[in-house]
Image (tube, rainbow, N blue to C red):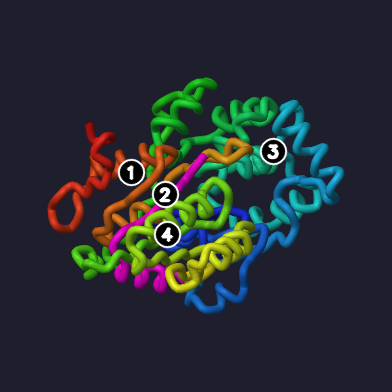
Amino acid sequence: MKNFKVCIICFNYPASSETFIEHHVKGLNSDLIVEKLNLEKLLNSKSDRRYFAINKPFIKNANNAISRVAQFVARRILGIQGYLCPSESAIILKKYLENIKPDVLLVEWGHLAVSLLPIIKEQNLPLVPHFHGMDLSVCWGNRSYRKQLIDLLQYSKNIIVVNKKIQASKLISIGCPKDKIWCIPCGAQVEKIKVSKNIQNKDIKFITVSRLVEKKGPLFTLRAFREAVKYHPQATLTMIGEGPLFSRCKKYIRKNNLLYNVRLLGAKPHNETLIELSNSNIFLQHSITSITGDQEGWGVSIAEAQCAGLPVVSTRACRQLVYSMISSHKNRHGRLCDARPAHIKK
């Protein structure tokens, strides 16, 4: 029997904030075509899979500040510019696809899938796009992108989303058949996550794991934690993640005398992150909708925290994610892990 050959296409690999893609690559035993390959991280992992790096952008984006502003206005405000693959990248991608000869393509992120669709159509390859977050929030406001999506949805064999309430309903609203959509949240590797021994500890050890970007709300987390320290001076907060708000978080910690309470660790390997989870007793996720409309798709870190037995304190922006996990999963002690405030439980 012929082995079914899967090829995954994504932007960056491996990325600390996208461990779910690593799980897809390993679980599906797939080849990988990537815009940028992180060779240093890749060399530390043993693998016999084939990796193909384009080393050029998959999506045509502006090169200078003025052009970027114009592109932002065209895409986000006027909705007159979609997502296209540059010709140089398209030529390299075609060669890689001819070399691999996959039975199916799994493309991570919807806006990447629409940009590569003409090439995939030309090669007549079965396609499954995987939507995650910004591809159905920020990008959704772009009229040209929504038109591209209609073509993508018609061509695709199946479509994967990570939540039904927001993502699936949007796709259905533009004509996607319900039976094409599969809701598969990016799960946690339960067997690798140890239940925290500090859950019932009197020490207050908060932890948050996310990219330090606007929609994850790291500065709001710090402001809330500063208030908690007034009542519990011994409380600690471990922040894991990197991003454009790292320096602002560092400055806030220093300015508000939180150096002895907050550990700002930056990005950490996944196994080290799991150790930190097992040493904590409350998980925080302060997701918001960013000024550009970017929203949380599915909080993998929330799922991992609940696997570790931690109560999750979250905002309304990711409340539905927590609810769906609460309703369908029990923690390892056999009880529903419901950390919602009393007024929400009602």
According to the image, label 4 marks what residue? 208
Tell me the magenta residue range.
Answer: 269-288
- Type of residue at label 3? Pro
Residue under pointer 2:
299
Disc number lying in front (4 or 1): 4
Q: Name the residue under label 1.
A: 322
**Towards the viewer: 195 or 154:** 195
Task: State which quarter of the image contains the C terminus.
Answer: top left
- Badge 1 vs badge 2, beta-carbon distance below 8 Å: yes
The residue most toward the front is 230
Q: From the viewer's perspective, is the residue at label 3 or at label 4 nearer?
A: 4
Which dot marks residue 118? Answer: 3
> Element under label 2?
loop
Q: Quadrant of residue 225?
A: bottom left
Residue at 40 percent of width and 38 percent of height: 316
Which badge, 4 or 1, is on the more N-terminal residue?
A: 4
